[in-house]
Image (spheres, helix red, strand yellow):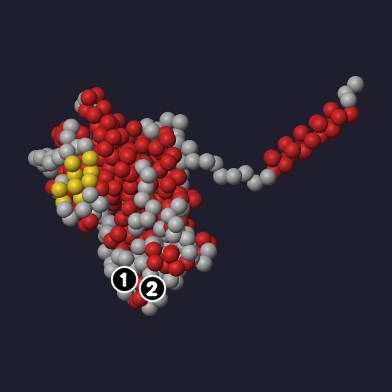
Amino acid sequence: MARPHSRLSLAIVLAITLIIAVAPQPAAATAAPAAFAHPGVLVSRAQLDFVRSKVNAGAQPWKSAYDQMIASPLASLSRAPKPRAVVECGPYSNPNNGCTDERQDALAAYTTALAWYITRDSRYAEKAIQIMDAWSAVITDHTNSNAPLQTGWAGSSWPRAAEIIRYTYTGWSATGVNRFSTMLRNVYLPKVINGSLRTNGNWELTMTAAALGIAVFLQDKAAYDKAVNTFMARLPAYVYLTTDGAFPKGPVGSGIDTRDEVVDYWQGQDTFVDGLSQETCRDFTHTGYGLAAIAHIAETARIQGQDLYPQIADRLRHTLGLHAKYQLGTAVPSWLCGGSLTLGLGPVTEVGFNALNNRLGIAMTNTQTLTERQRPAGTNNLFVAWETLTHAGNPN
């Protein structure tokens, strides 16, 4: 016969079990995929197959976007890469010792990788390999004040190219792949993985996009998790929603906490509305860098099985809509940046618009108008390239 306290213990256990079962559970912790998907940085194989079918069918806007890309100097089969051991980039790339060359070569590697996949012309794959091998054989460091941002810009493009070539073409040698991997791990990842708390937010977002892409190529789960966590912490400090409170959050750990500190950090703007960015009142060009990086991170994570879009959709749709509205010519109210904006958003809306409007069904009138008006979207010559081609109407 059971002892009385045994019955009591059983009752307590059952009660605790019930409480745990019905209590609200915390959101799942960030977790890298058990197995990384490849190609898996910004574009997936399914996305690439969609693009290839559209281009081969002569369908628009993909065919005109492809024609724009293939006519670009970045797609030239006679391109000679210009690697150097140390890339030195000061403020606004002054001095510019290899900065433009590195960014352009990284974009060219991605461009020719895309051209290879669409055309199946192996000359494009070999050109991408030539460029990647040239840099991985030489570069050792980035220096001067813009080094972290430069590393983020180039480091965003390199793994996109490498993923396509490594997983869809058989001609890249194991030696080349290993040396390129070593370059990403030793030269690029250390410069971008720890973020940049007190600079303008486009820095950390771009650096984090690079870190995430590099983590996928290296299949580095710890770096992947760190990049996603950095992104989720930074996003509310870059794009405001009224649900955040009376004023935006400062970057976690930055020491920017009080309203006065936040206003100063937000370029003196002291009226906050849904979708406002930390750099809106600086200029739309730098804001565009941040918005592009946000979409790139979410797109890569989605390909890897971690769909962040539902968590960030409200923030992303509001900020794309606000900036599209004024980029399209809406009069600027006096409360916004003193009534004057410096426009120039750039070709940065396609990925986010496709994710939110085409996949999730969210109406985005201003963003749609701007996106369609800018097609085919080309490159910003830093880290954004050919996104009408890769993401317009792409359901995958």
Camera sees residue 99: yes
Identity of the residue furthest to the top in this view: 1
Residue at left offset 25%, top offset 52% = 145
Residue identified by numbered label 1:
341
What x and y, as percent, mark residue 288? Answer: 31, 58
What x and y, as percent, mark residue 308? Answer: 46, 47
Q: Is residue 396 above or below residue 323?
A: above
Of residues 350 and 248, the one drawn nearer to the viewer in this rendering? 248
Tell me the quarter of the picture where residue 155 sits. Answer: top left
Tell me the quarter of the picture where residue 107 sits. Answer: top left
Task: State if disc 1 and disc 2 touch (CB < 8 Å).
Answer: yes
- Give the numbered dot on residue 287: none
Q: Is residue 105 above or below residue 329?
A: above
On-image quarter of the N terminus: top right
What x and y, as percent, mark residue 85? Answer: 17, 38
- Give the numbered dot on residue 336: 2
Label 2's element?
A: loop
Residue at left offset 45%, top offset 49% = 232
Residue at left offset 44%, top offset 71% = 271
Cα separation between marks 2 and 1: 8 Å
